[in-house]
Amino acid sequence: MSSSSTPPFEPMSSDKLEAFGVHHVTKGLGRIKGGIMAKGEGSYVVYEDGQRLLDFTCGIGVTSLGHVNPRVSQAAAEQCLKLVHSQCSISLHEPYLRLIERLLPIMPDPSLDSFFFWNSGSEAVEAAVKMARVFTGKQNIICVQGAYHGRTFGAMALTKSKTVYSQGFAPLMPGVFTMPFPYWHQSGFQPLTSTHTLTQHALYQLDLLLSQQTAPSDTAAIIIEPVLGEGGYVPAPSEFLQGLRERCDKHGIMLIVDEVQSGFGRTGNYFAIEESGVRPDILVTAKGLANGFPLSGVISRKEVTDKLKPGSMGGTYAGNAVSCAAAVAVADVFREENILANVQARSTELFSALNALKYDPNLRPHILDVRGRGLMVGVEFASPPRPSTPANMASRVAASCIEKGMLILTTSVYQVIRFIPPLNVSKADLAKGCQIFAEAVREVVKEG
């Protein structure tokens, strides 16, 4: 048929579009809510049918400065009219270099001075593993129980939070070994077990791992999230992180710190690792880095990245100019609008509200833990067979929150809800979200 006889294209009506999407979008993607999201406005999202919901998911920790932040979106729009794509194997571009200029002063250690930008957290983890193997001349990688590092092939092998991410895709990348993380529930301890006890248990098991399963001479890196993400929003104790650093130094192992979700202000510091004083050999960041534009970063020491051969790193869209321009604006907003101070203030209010629920006599049997850092906060509910505890409490509370006008997510194999509001969320919107959550919890407990 000639092009002249091709019928004109007529877009589908909005009322039919969702059904069309459900049919044609792969079943491998899951969603927590039906409908079509039409636009974002700061801490809110609006659906095609007019529903306006408070968004405490931020696209899983991505739109940290709110949806369609005017300064970030303006910077991206202006860059679109200058240069959209300058492939990293062809030439440098200014936004890439301006972003390095902004990031260098806020690195958690001054040794981190060599940057590679990619598209996603998974890709950045893959690059970090490649680097660690080249830098050390060794193969094996140690990850922790409950970790999430991504769904691409190498990152998937390092992900230990849920089997859904790797089920049916074996054989996975070899050379991966798993150690415990100091989280009471995974380790079979009681909720009030001291962090020191949990840390000593995990480090003892790491020492055994290095003696029994992967010799230090075969081990390239240990990879760790300073706050477990998909594993339940569990902060790593400073003592544990310092113990990892000591063992890495002792054995010539690289420490990869995965701050894809916890980094860029989420925990009240630019990077969660700062609290421990631990130096990463390789730092991985993404998500909030560019407020919704696809961008990740892999940062290490120039003295070791100089060992890489030109061409061994790269990617068609790596360090895209528009994404980098957006990230430059994000860094400027953080600095000029005092975002970290807002995180710290709102965090105090969030913990106060959640702990009030935890210690409410009518709810106390059902809430095991309130934990986290900054505005990366988890609430863990009890599970049957505890008497009178509702089944599937986390997913039911999340569903009730959505019905009441707030998007919120569960996480981990346990009954955990995670709070990931925008880092510039207002005092009023945070209070509104806490009120919706409290109503949902009470409603589910009453239903039983």
Image (cartoon, rainbow, N blue to C red):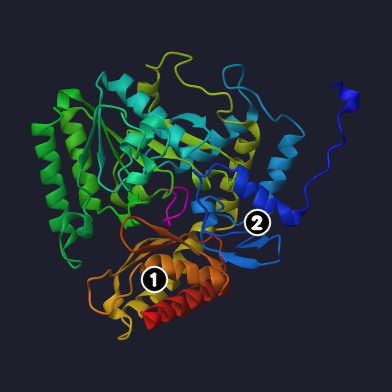
Density class for disc 1 (Cα within 10 Å; few <14, some 14-19, many ≥20) is many
Residue labelled with disc 1:
351
Q: In this view, does 34 lie to the left or right of 235?
A: right
Residue 237 sits in quarter = bottom left
User: As rendered, which of 376 and 442 lies closer to the eye?
Assistant: 442
Q: Which amino acid does label 1 sit on?
A: Phe
Q: Element at badge 2?
A: strand
Q: Is residue 415 above or below residue 31?
A: below
Q: What label sits on residue 145 in the rendered view?
A: none
At x 63% / y 33%, what residue is drawn? 95
Residue 385 is situated, as x and y percent measured from the top left of the image, at 22, 71
Residue labelled with disc 2:
37
Indicate the quadrant containing the N terminus: top left, top right, bottom left or bottom right.
top right
Q: In this view, does 179 lie to the left or right of 85?
A: left
Q: Is residue 296 above or below residue 387?
A: above
Q: What stretch is highlighted in magenta?
A: 263-270
Residue 348 sits in quarter = bottom left
User: As rendered, which of 294 and 173 lies closer to the eye?
Assistant: 173
Q: Nearer the viewer, mark 1 or mark 2?
A: 2
Q: Is residue 416 above or below residue 226?
A: below
User: As rendered, which of 82 and 46 lies closer to the eye?
Assistant: 46
